[in-house]
Amino acid sequence: MNLISNIESNDINNIKSEVDFDTEVLEYLNVKGYVRRRQLVNYLMKTHPDKRGYKKKSIDRKLSNMRKSGILVSLKYDDLPKYGIKETDGRASYLIPKKTLKRKKDLDKTFSYLDSADITTKKLILEEISRYEIKYVLSPNQLDILAEHLDTEDNELVDSLLEILFRYIVEKGIEPSNKDKFLEILRLLLKLYKVSPDEYPILRRHITWVLGYYRDSFVIDQLKIDAESLEDPSSVKCDYCDPLIAPFIEEHSLELFNFQIELKLQGKERASEFISQIKDEARNPKQRMEGF
């Protein structure tokens, strides 16, 4: 009787161990969206160094069981670009929860409505993309499509598009595939928006910051224009004060110094002082506040 009880107890413990393992893996993937299998194995071994069932062989077996039971899906190398994954190792295997994969298919369908949608529907589509951003990743080609929709007079839509593009490029490292066309669009937008609309104070900053991220000289040209043409240049000071753009401004310090000489000779003291302030900020840029 005791032997049977011990066997049943061991079976229950083994089942509980498998359930705990599955839950932990899914919680991790729900945050990451997807992860390379090798990275996941290393993470589990590192976080459970002395725990039974967390040796490499056991982890590989449990992950295989999760895949066989349909909880996880293994992404093939050819599928990785769809998720914005830059991978050069053709042997690499990535894991993604099956529910997340289904959500991506649903959201890809939602995304496909963008080209034919009216302004209101476009905003709803962008809300949906942002809502599931952790588990749903846009591809470089999809980012190209978003960039094309920046050609609109609706400030709210432009602001939402720029925010998503900024996060993908700067924070996720996923860029539009047609970078030249994207930069051309940003330059046109920067010409259009002399200052950010009152309701969307970060709109113009996202443009200058991304141009600075790509080290596009147009942002230096615009800085000069702002210094001379704006009644109050300090209103756009934050557009040029960010760790993303500071190194690029530093690289153009001589060009800006020569520009200051021209301004001084023309009696444009305030414009010259504005350039000095930007250069001072570039030497010691403040960290960007969360949400910007």
Image (cartoon, grey):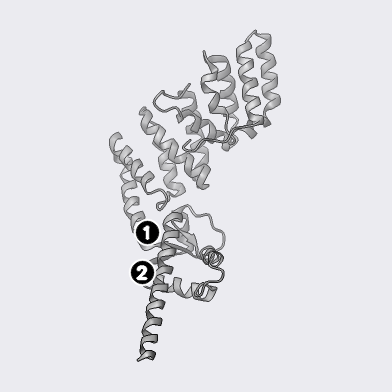
Q: Could you say whether the residue bearing mark 2 is in a helix, strand or loop?
A: loop
- Residue 82, horizontal then vertical, whole percent: 44, 54
Near-viewer residue (17 or 85): 17
- Residue 266, horizontal then vertical, whole percent: 65, 8
Q: CA distance from mark 1 to mark 2?
A: 11 Å
Instruction: Name the residue type under label 1.
Output: Leu
- Residue at x 57%, y 15% (from the top left corner): 228
Counting every numbered tag in the picture gives 2
- Residue at x 33%, y 41% (from the top left corner): 115
In the rendered view, does 150 fall on the left or right side of 87?
left
Instruction: Name the residue type under label 2.
Output: Gly
Q: Check if mark 1's residue and mark 2's residue have beta carbons within 8 Å.
A: no
Alpha-carbon neighbours of circle 1 within 10 Å: few (<14), some, or many (≥20)?
A: some
- Residue at x 67%, y 17% (from the top left corner): 260
* Residue 249 in the image: above or below residue 71: above
Q: Is residue 291 something that shows in the picture?
A: yes
**Circle 1 residue:** 101
* Residue 26 in the image: above or below residue 52: above
Near-viewer residue (290 or 178): 290
- Residue at x 39%, y 70% (from the top left corner): 19
- Residue 41, horizontal then vertical, whole percent: 52, 67
| Quarter of the figure with the N terminus | bottom left
Outermost front residue: 2
Q: Is residue 118 something that shows in the picture?
A: no
**Circle 2 residue:** 70
- Residue 281, horizontal then vertical, whole percent: 63, 27
Alpha-carbon neighbours of circle 2 within 10 Å: few (<14), some, or many (≥20)?
A: few
First-in-chain label (1 vs 2): 2
